[in-house]
């Protein structure tokens, strides 16, 4: 069936040797996934929707970059990448043509079948899985999820890392949902959070899958190992064993840090983007930012009739900023909207983690409060790492390694040892690294700092660290003043 009028509703679009699975944002050449960037994929979808017609450059830019100001050169670069990916112009086949002074047109025949799907499991069975049902939609992760969905079929091992509460599990689950029908033997979810240390991880996984290792070797399946933090070494060994024994198995891992094994692709889940104060002009503009969008969606689910107004924008932005753009923290705060109202919520959000302690009772314990989420990560740190994290909470903002050594070092935490522990905390997503010119600056999420500072203030080291921090700030300001005066004299 050829149709050049509206291919957007078809779940599967076919042209030449390619199959475009729209919902999964996956292009296959035969059975092999095609490597293609996210913007190129967006352009392809727009052109296929208007196949046989000319789409102006302005229309393409407006649909592919709806919230950004983009030059035409950006469009040309991504069109060129799309053509290369499709082999446009090779073997006499053309897909996209440039119409001078007008735009671009997809000229190859396009077939669509709304009932078609990705390759099904053998013997006509429905896709197999044990994926947990999500109770809420995924907000602000479309680009990341789309990228992971495109990469996973050609990457046998992928690890998703990030800070506590950033939504690693949510992202992994959404990726697995979208790839479910690609894997003929299904997608299988195993949560390692509650696994006892003395149990064999391989035996645990095989028991959960209800198969033996010899059966697994021939399976074309996706295995999701969620929450590998306290089983990291065992998980690394398990992954290497499974990838060697089962050549058609793909593995998706979540944890605070990478496994550091061969052929691993690592993706860091970022904080949700926040609007700058200067961009708080309209409600529509603010809702273009994932953090605000998530807050509003959860507030509406909690308080019937909630509506974001222009006068609310500074308050909502400040709430999201105080919560670092962390999805879990934003959800927990928005759940209090009916009790506190927006003004009350803003006033309370600076009071620490108490506000963020009433999540869904049906959620995993570590997701019922922000303190529980951080505590779950904190308890798997070494005693020395815990101690350093607490001491670093004396910094109210970012700090350099030089500042850390000056303020928080002690007899057994000095020099290179302190530096290596700080770097380890960054690898475990409890500190954020931010390169600034020739230096690396570290900072804690507000939620992590409040957790650590609450504990530090109950220790004997608190007052001394406060005094050392104050002296360091005084020296830094004096040095900056002397440098300024020296420049003025010169």
Image: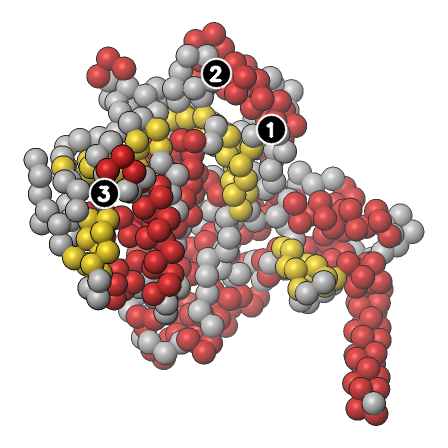
- Disc 1 secondary structure class: loop
Of the numbered discs 3 and 2, the one sitting upstream in the chain is 3
Q: Identify the residue at horizontal 48%, vertical 16% (top origin).
A: 246
- Residue lying at the far front of the rendered structure: 92
Q: Secondary structure at mark 3?
A: loop
Please give the count of numbered marks on the rendered protein.
3
Picture layout, residue 366 above or below residue 196: below
Q: Residues within 10 Å of mark 1 (few under 14, many from 20)?
A: few
- Which picture quadrant has residue 150? top left
User: Of discs 3 and 1, which sits in the foreground?
Assistant: 3
Q: Could you give the CA–CA distance between mark 1 and mark 2, rounded to whole angstroms?
A: 15 Å
Whole-percent x, y for residue 14 in the image: 19, 35
Q: Residue furthest top?
A: 214
Q: Which residue is mark 1?
A: 262
Please identify the quadrant where the C terminus is shown.
Answer: bottom right
Circle number at residue 246: 2
Q: Earlier in the sequence, mark 3 or mark 1?
A: 3
Residue reaching furthest bottom?
A: 489
Residue at 49% x, 59% y: name it: 325
- Residue 435 location in percent, x, y? 66, 60
Q: Which residue is mark 3?
A: 94
- Mark pair 3, 2: CA separation: 39 Å
Do we see residue 135 in this rendering?
Answer: no
Residue drawn at (60%, 28%) of the image:
262
> With respect to residue 54, does 386 lie above or below?
above
Q: In the figure, residue 461 lies in which quadrant?
A: bottom right
Q: Residues within 10 Å of mark 3 (few under 14, many from 20)?
A: some
Compared across the picture, whether 134 is left or right of 110 comes to right
The quarter of the rendered structure image containing the N terminus is: top left
Left or right relative to 454: residue 318: left
Q: CA distance from mark 3 to mark 1?
A: 39 Å
């Amino acid at each position: 069936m050829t149709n050049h009028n509206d291919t957007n509703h078809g779940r599967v679009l076919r042209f030449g040797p390619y199959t475009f699975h729209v919902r999964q944002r996956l292009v296959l050449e035969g059975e092999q996934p095609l490597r293609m960037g996210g913007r190129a994929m967006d352009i392809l979808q727009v052109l296929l929707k208007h196949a046989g017609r000319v789409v102006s450059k302005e229309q393409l830019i407006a649909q592919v970059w709806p919230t950004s100001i983009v030059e035409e050169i950006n469009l040309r670069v991504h069109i060129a990448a799309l053509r290369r990916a499709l082999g446009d112009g090779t073997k006499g086949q053309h897909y996209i043509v440039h119409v001078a002074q007008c735009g671009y047109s997809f000229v190859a025949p396009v077939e669509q079948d709304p009932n078609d799907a990705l390759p099904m499991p053998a013997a006509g069975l429905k896709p197999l899985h044990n994926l947990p049902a999500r109770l809420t939609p995924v907000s602000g992760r479309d680009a990341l999820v789309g990228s992971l969905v495109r990469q996973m079929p050609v990457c046998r091992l992928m690890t998703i890392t990030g800070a506590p509460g950033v939504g690693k599990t949510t992202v992994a689950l959404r990726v697995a949902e979208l790839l479910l029908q690609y894997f003929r033997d299904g997608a299988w979810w195993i949560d390692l959070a509650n696994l006892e240390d003395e149990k064999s991880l391989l035996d645990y996984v095989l028991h959960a899958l209800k198969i033996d290792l010899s059966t697994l070797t021939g399976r074309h399946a996706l295995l999701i190992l969620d929450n590998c933090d306290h089983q990291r070494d065992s998980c690394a060994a398990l992954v290497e064993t499974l990838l060697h024994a089962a050549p058609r198995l793909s593995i998706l891992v979540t944890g605070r840090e990478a496994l550091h094994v061969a052929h691993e692709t690592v993706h860091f889940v970022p904080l949700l983007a926040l609007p700058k104060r200067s961009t708080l002009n309209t409600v529509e503009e603010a809702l273009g930012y994932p953090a605000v969008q998530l807050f509003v969606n959860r507030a509406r689910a909690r308080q019937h009739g909630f509506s974001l107004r222009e006068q609310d924008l500074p308050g909502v932005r400040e709430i999201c900023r105080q919560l670092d753009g962390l999805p879990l923290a934003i959800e927990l705060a928005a759940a209090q909207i009916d009790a506190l109202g927006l003004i009350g919520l803003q006033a309370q959000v600076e009071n620490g983690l108490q506000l963020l302690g009433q999540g869904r009772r049906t959620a995993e314990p570590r997701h019922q409060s922000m303190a529980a989420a951080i505590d779950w990560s904190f308890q798997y740190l070494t005693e020395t790492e815990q101690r350093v994290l607490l001491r670093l909470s004396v910094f109210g903002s970012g700090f350099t390694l030089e500042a850390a050594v000056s303020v928080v070092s002690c007899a057994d935490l000095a020099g290179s040892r302190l530096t290596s522990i700080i770097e380890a905390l960054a690898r475990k997503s409890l500190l954020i690294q931010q390169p600034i010119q020739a230096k690396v600056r570290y900072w804690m999420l507000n939620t992590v700092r409040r957790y650590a500072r609450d504990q530090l203030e109950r220790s004997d080291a608190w007052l001394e660290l406060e005094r050392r921090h104050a002296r360091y700030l005084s020296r830094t300001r004096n040095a900056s003043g002397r440098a300024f005066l020296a420049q003025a004299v010169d």
